[in-house]
Image: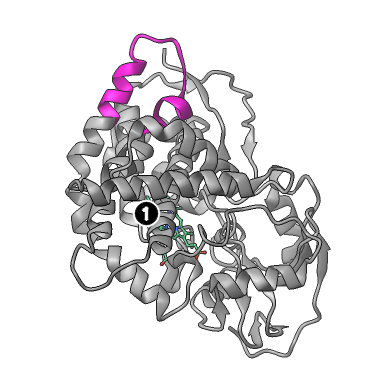
Amino acid sequence: MTAQATRAVREEVIGPDFFDDPHKYYRRWRKHGPVLRVLRPNGLPHWLIIGYDEARAALADPRMRKDVTELYETLRRVAPDGKGGGASEDLSSHMLNADPPEHTRLRKLVTREFTGRRVAALRPRIEEITRNLLDEMEGKDEVDLIEGLAAPLPVMVICELLGVPFEDRDDFQKWSKILLDADPNVDTVAVSQKMTDFLADLLEAKRANPGEDLLSSLVANGDGSDELSTKELVAMAYLLLVAGHETALHLIGNGIYLMLRDREAFQALRAHPDRIPAATEEVLRRFGPVGWATMRFTSEEATFGGVRIPAGQLVAISLDAANHDPAVTPEAPRLHQVDETPKHLAFGHGIHFCLGAPLGRLEANVAFTQLLERFGDLRLADPDFFPEWRLGFMRGFTSLPARLT
Ligand code: HEM
């Protein structure tokens, strides 16, 4: 937050082609300052923060609230005719849409499951799953690296951790994609209900017959300190299941794509796998899976980058734009030449900083290391391949065809 003189507010319209290349827009807007007002193609007007310092400050500012009931009220007030899409309010009542003390209470219940130490213990299993997936590819000329690796790896891991049957993946992956993409032309009410019923039934089954997994432990009130209501349990399961695979899927897919676009980097990382974790951080900065942070609203007036945002306003923070702020990263390093951990906000910042960051990083590092080691001749199937972007909240590809030989 800066206390400079207040700037004039710039208003921009987001065109239907925004997601094809958001940086084209960001570069233009940046000339006029780090904070602006935008009108989305679905008719929703809101503020947008695109500067790195301003985004970081806003993410940690207690006046930027997330409480789900007030957020949905603000959405209805700001765009009464706007079609929102997205998950139902009940399904969205999880920690990512909560403020302290509610947020603190919910996050505390699962924090210990995602610490660096806990996650490091999962490494052998993540390596085994990855090996098995790569075994399936052996002998083929051409594969889709999203379908064959980037999608199944994080889903298998989060299913095992939570105790969600992997056989149900086709259903919950389809529903979570619809809910995250929040296309105003798709009936998300019915899909939210399907997801809610699926999770409620699963939690009920765990109550009757608990396993060794995280959801069973939450249902059984694991550490005896706090009990979650059924609605809270369903929302928690939804957040962990969706946040736990959609993001990591795109981190892996986006990283492989960047490596395949730079042959020298690919070979250098293959020869020096110890450089892969640093490369992963640059993938997160340059091409992180979350384009914008989830929506916030101002509980009182707040000034960022000299722009005064009144109380009761919707604010989006573009992590992707912040990560490309030339004031912070004037030049992108090549993936094999990352010497200093790049400054980025790809996992957010402040109290909502990604709970699964250690897990996401580990999955990506294992996937990149094994893929490069096993398939030294890996190439994009079509060198001119221009990926079909998945639009909306997530940034990534729906498929990534590659040749193994
Ligand atoms: C691998 C790439 C991942 C990326 C780039 C990513 C990104 C993010 C971001 C940006 C946020 C904050 C959003 C905001 O402030 O509006 C967040 C929150 C969260 N992430 Fe991740 N995530 C990843 C993986 C995971 C995984 C594997 C899990 C596992 C369950 C996970 C669980 C969560 C949870 C529970 C929150 C909410 C935390 C809170 O509200 O306190 N994420 N993530």
Q: Which of 256 and 240 is in front in this view?
A: 240
Residue displayed at 82% across by 69% down: 11
Q: What element carries label 1?
A: loop
Ligand 1 sits in quadrant: bottom left
Disc 1 marks a residue whose amino acid type is Asp
- Stretch of the chain drawn in magenta: 130-152
Q: Nearer the viewer, residue 249 or 299?
A: 299
Residue 6 position (above or below residue 268): below
Residue at the front extreme, as displayed: 208
Residue displayed at 33% across by 14% down: 138
Crowd band around label 1 with a 10 angstrom C-alpha radius: few (<14), some (14–19), many (20+): few
| Quarter of the C terminus within the rendering | top left
Q: Which of 63 and 180 is in front in this view?
A: 180
Q: Which of 152 and 183 is in front in this view?
A: 183
The image position of residue 307, as x and y in percent, is 71, 81
User: Which is the main secondary structure of the residues drawn in magenta?
Assistant: helix
Residue 7 position (above or below residue 155): below
| Quarter of the N terminus within the rendering | bottom right
User: Residue tagged by mark 1?
Assistant: 339
Residue displayed at 55% across by 55% down: 331
Report the side of 40 relative to 131 (left or right): right
Tell me if residue 368 can be seen.
no
The image position of residue 135, as x and y in percent, is 29, 18
Residue 368 position (above or below residue 237): above
The quarter of the picture where residue 256 lies is top left
Residue 210 position (above or below residue 131): below
Report the side of 178 relative to 184 (left or right): left
- Residue 117 belongs to the span the image colors magenta: no
Residue displayed at 81% across by 72% down: 10
The image position of residue 197, as x and y in percent, is 46, 46
